[in-house]
Image (tube, grey):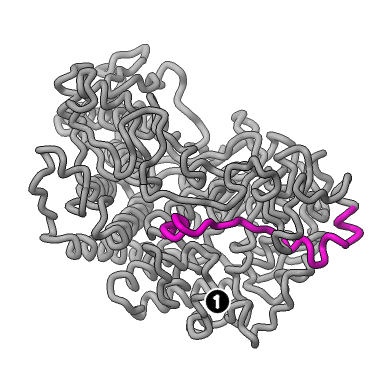
Amino acid sequence: MKNRILLYALSAGMMLSSCNAFLDLEPESALSPEQYLTTEENLGAYATDLYNMFPEHERSTWGYWRSDANTDDMASAQPGDAFAPGYWRVEQTGGSYAFERIYRCNYFLNFVLPLYEAGEITGVEANIRHYIGEAYFFRAWAYFEKLKALGDFPIVEEPIADDLVQLTVASKRMPRNEVARFILADLDRAIEYMSETPPVGGSNRLDDDCAHLMKSRVALYEGTWEKYFKGTAFVPNGPQWPGASKDYNQGYEFPSGDIDSEIDYFLKIAMDESKIIADKYPLTENTGVFQKSADEAANPYFNMFGAIDMSQYPEIMLWRDYGASAGLTNSVVEFAAAANSGCGITKSMVEAFVMSNGLPIYDAASGYPDDADLLKVTENRDSRAQIFIKKPGDTNLHSAGGPESYVTEPWPNVVHSTASMKYTTGYAIRKGLNFDGAQSFRNESEVGLIVFRAVEAYLNYMEACYERTGSLDGDAKTYWSKIRNRAHVADFQTTIEHTVMEKEKDDWGAWSAGQLVDATLYNIRRERRCELMAEGYRGADIRRWRSLDQLIDTPYHVYGVNLWEKLASNADFLAANPGGLKEGENVSPRSFGNYLAPYHIMQNNRVYNGYGWRMAHYLDPIAVQHFLITGDGDVNASPLYQNPGWPVQAGLGAQN
């Protein structure tokens, strides 16, 4: 029987309690730690429970494929508060400043390491070491989530007792680059302890290569963040950096000497670590053709994203398994074969895909027909657009499907009263689709979830190389060519030479710090966007690139299909939209332009006049509760400091 290590959570007796207000967690177990954490088997069980930190498919939606909602890639039924200044406010309690996951790793490491060093854990030593390595990995994972959300953060390596003095000391926020260095150090320990082949689980369980890829991700994130936020309050020693307000951070000096050296430090690591993976893992074959029936040749690249058993694809380094026998299923196929649970890709996302000849769609020689005919919008485009963007009449399933899935893709219903079945932008994609109709019933899909895919290393290297040196070395060119060849798109240099940055302004990746970037860097970012579409990377990318400054003064409207030029008079489309198109009631008015603007329909929509932004929104605010706890009731006495632009008062939005 196939081992499903990512499928199972630990039994209730082993589960740790949920987090209280701070770090004062205690494990709940029928056995004491002295009895429990002394065998290889039990260490493995504890480590298995940590796998719940990884993303999962929400049971009754399109699952993790909705993760790029509230970016320029995808739009859900309702916009996010971050793009409606004044709606995102400081909370009294809760928020991102929490330690539950970190505590669980610290508890394990602090208890197990002395026992291991004393030779008091029974079992196969290599397996014991692997589980210790997993704990280091998951502490790094938990800290990376904090780095992305909050930047500066306390570095806590021990489980802290419920003692105000200890809690206060532990609450000193360390500069974000120190947090990133701590994460990388934990990943080095994970690599040291973990095996190339995990004790059980195969590609359902971490190995040392996953830690290498994670290192490249973290290092690229921090290196680019520091590069683009240099000279602001969002990096240590920047003007008005709030960390300088605390004695423990005054006079801070970068380990590398200065911020430029620190940036180079991280970008070099990103290159080194991603090269390890890119040179080792091949890319899955893409035929370039969408399989319309069971009789046609399969496309491994397409099938990879909706596979039930993802172990057959070497490009997938780690994946989360689902199965009805364990009572863990999802609805991914149902919504991949329907309306993506109300989360549509945007006009900007569609336009990012170049033609197969490598030319951007606006180039006079590209051969692009235009987007007025929904059936032709991906014609002669990058094969990733052709196989993933759905068109009316396409075959979604090769056998009978569930009641809310479509065997044949219909014309989009953009006025549906049920949010999950509404084609919010008019566009839908089919990542995660499995052609088996039995998989398309509500909560009966068993398709897996990709956690690490090797192509990320190719993309990370390309970007880190260019950001660090201003040019592409031989490896970067090789990796980019391999990605392009798989996508059946002409050489990337053709695209760069024909890119007009003024025409790319709707792509947030074209911007950093309020300025358009150069064509080469933009096309590296474009490649990343197209390859990783709907895989949950976009939100972090646009923040580390500082790609939202321009929204502060210039509202951004999200658009979908070309509605009013031809589509609105198409009889098949009108039949799919019962009740008709009502301007200002269920669709955006014709006077606003040809394109469906999902948030410019009802005037009471909080982003009716476009997405806005505040600099403070690049990081989360810390809830007031945490200042009160560590300040013994006085927020001003706390060792904590608030993130730039956010007040220390509940119910208020960002100040700038």
Q: Residue furthest bottom?
A: 365
Residue drawn at the location 29% of the way across and 14% of the way down: 32
Q: Residue furthest top?
A: 30
Instruction: Identify the image quadrant of residue 299.
Output: bottom right
As for residue 239 lying within the magenta part, the answer is no
Nearest to the observer: residue 46 or residue 3 = 46
Q: Which residue is mark 1?
A: 485
Q: Against 457, is 247 above or below?
A: above
Check disc 1 and report its element: helix, strand or loop.
helix
Q: On the image, which quarter does residue 272 sit in?
A: bottom left
Quarter of the image with the N terminus is top right
Residue 402 shows in this picture: yes
Whether residue 256 sits left or right of residue 146 in the image: it is left
Relative depth, front residue between 368 and 313: 368
Give whichever of 150, 453 is nearer the camera.
150
The stretch in magenta equals 547-574
Quadrant in the rendering for residue 520: bottom left
Q: Is residue 197 visible?
A: no
Residue 493 horizontal/vertical position (percent): 48, 83
Task: Residue at 30% x, 55% y: name it.
Answer: 222
| Number of marks present in the image shown | 1
Q: Which residue type does callout 1 highlight? A: Asn
Q: Main secondary structure of the magenta part?
A: loop
- The image shows residue 320 at horizontal and vertical percentages of 52, 42
At a point 28% along the width and 40% down the height, the residue shown is: 136
**Residue 416 drawn above or below residue 314:** above
Q: Is residue 169 left or right of residue 472?
A: left
Residue 598: % across, % down: 67, 50
Please report the residue visible at 78 percent of the width from the left and 46 percent of the height from the top.
415
